[in-house]
Amino acid sequence: MDKTARYFDKWATIGRSEDMEIGHGLNVNKFLDSIDFDRKFSFLDIGCGNGWVVRKISHIPNCKQAIGIDKSKNMIEKAKMKRTSKKEKYFQVELESWKNTVKFDVVFSMESLYYSVPMEPALAKVYTILKPDGVFYCGTDFYSDNHLTTRWAKDMKIPMDLRSKSQWKKMFEKMGFTTRTKQVKDPTHKSKWKREYGTLFVIGKKQSVD
Ligand SMILES: C[S@@+](CC[C@H](N)C(=O)[O-])C[C@H]1O[C@@H](n2cnc3c(N)ncnc32)[C@H](O)[C@@H]1O
């Protein structure tokens, strides 16, 4: 089994998925709550962990279906146990080898894409599974401008693709996305990096067909 999947299987059994739900929650919820989901949409969370974002999104009235995928079996088991709506579905699968045929209006991922090293093939897969005009909201705390988080690669000892904010943006643009970025900070948090840099969201819109 893949080293990253094994790592997060362990995290799922020691309560770290709930720690991430709390730790990532403030910035992610702030970000997601700023999006106007004003049309019917289908939703995919890549590297969904215990499914907390999928659960949240599934309760938005315009959400038709919310799917979470994760390559960790234990994370997916947790997510299935915590299910709160019939709109939620979970699959244990790695993004890059997922043989799905369905395309999505909205794709999201938090702290997940950079575990694909290099990220480009994973990002190319995201591009193919989005509908024209679809949007990818990609959150990361691990980026080189946010220098206090860069040691995570050494601490975790699993492959992680470290890029700067401008490299993230360029990578999305090269893939064909119309791209913007947003940093969500937490001004009262005890961690300096959350106060000063925060979570970087790279937002990529797929071209429409004309
Ligand atoms: C740091 S955790 C974040 C989990 C969740 N997004 C959250 O914020 O709580 C990263 C998750 O992404 C999953 N993951 C990493 N690379 C993946 C890939 N290529 N395909 C599917 N899942 C992946 C891992 O198994 C792990 O559960």
Image (cartoon, rainbow, N blue to C red):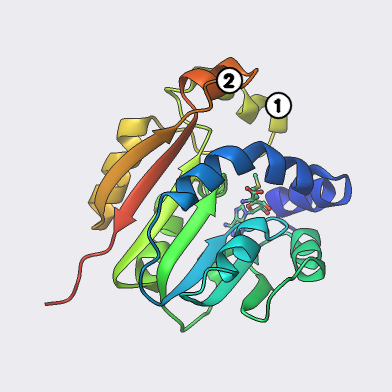
In the image, residue 117 lies at what x, y percent? 51, 46
Q: Is residue 147 above or below residue 98?
A: above
Instruction: Check disc 2 and report the residue beneath it.
Output: 188
Q: Nearer the viewer, residue 103 or 162?
A: 103
Is residue 127 in sight in this rendering?
A: yes
In the picture, the quarter occupied by the C terminus is bottom left
Contact between marks 1 and 2 (CB within 8 A): the answer is: no
**How many other residues sit within 10 Å of disc 1, few (<14), some (14-19) or many (≥20)?**
few
In the picture, the quarter occupied by the N terminus is bottom right
Instruction: Check disc 1 and report the residue beneath it.
Output: 155
Mark whose residue sits in front, 1 or 2 = 2
Is residue 118 in sight in this rendering?
A: no
In the image, residue 152 lies at what x, y percent? 63, 27
Distance, label 1 to label 2, CA atoms, is 26 Å
In the image, residue 74 lies at what x, y percent? 81, 60
Q: Secondary structure at mark 1?
A: helix
Q: Nearer the viewer, residue 98 or 41?
A: 41
Residue farthest to the right, as pictured: 14
Residue farthest to the left, as pictured: 210
Q: Amino acid at mark 2?
A: Thr
Q: Amino acid at mark 1?
A: Asp
Q: Hey, which quadrant is residue 93 in on the image?
A: bottom right
Residue at point 40%, 65% (across, down): 37
Q: Is residue 187 above or below residue 1?
A: above
Q: Secondary structure at mark 2?
A: loop
